[in-house]
Amino acid sequence: MTDVFDQAAERADEMLSDALFEQQRRAGLTGQTIQDSAHFCAECDEPISDARRAAYPGVHLCVDCKYQQEKQARRTRGY
Ligand SMILES: [Zn+2]
């Protein structure tokens, strides 16, 4: 298994386009999995799709609220 991961690390740039790999990379960075993803948005209580929960392990905001949050954050940081 170690060899596989070493090879994956060497080819990380190529592998980034692979959705599954990207998902695992995110999970590795945050230590979170789809199990940590919320079923409903913490802001507006809208259901969060399984695809979004899988793509963003630990997600707790729907697309709209996340967008608003990032827009707000950019404004706060003065970008
Ligand atoms: Zn929401």
Image: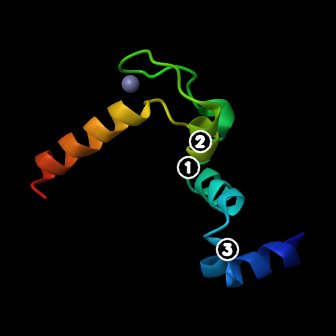
Q: Are marks 1 and 2 in contact (CB under 8 Å)?
A: yes
What's the distance in space between the residues labelled 1 and 2, CA to CA?
A: 8 Å
Earlier sequence position, callout 3 versus callout 1? 3
Q: Are marks 3 and 2 in contact (CB under 8 Å)?
A: no
Earlier sequence position, callout 3 versus callout 2? 3
- Note whether 34 is above or below 46 in the view shown: below
Name the residue carrying label 3: 15
Name the residue carrying label 1: 30
**Residue 8 percent coordinates (x, y):** 74, 76
Quadrant of the rendered image holding ligand 1: top left
- Note whether 37 is above or below 27 in the view shown: above
Q: Residue at x 69, y 84 (%)?
A: 10
Of the numbered discs in the image, which one, if any, rests on residue 57? 2
What's the distance in space between the residues labelled 3 and 2, CA to CA?
A: 19 Å
Q: Residue at x 37, y 17 (%)?
A: 44
**Residue 72 percent coordinates (x, y):** 19, 40
The residue under label 2 is which amino acid type? Pro
Q: Does residue 26 appear to the left or right of 3 in the view shown?
A: left
Q: Residues within 10 Å of mark 2 (few under 14, many from 20)?
A: many
Q: Residue at x 36, y 37 (%)?
A: 66
Image-quadrant location for residue 68: top left
The residue under label 3 is which amino acid type? Met
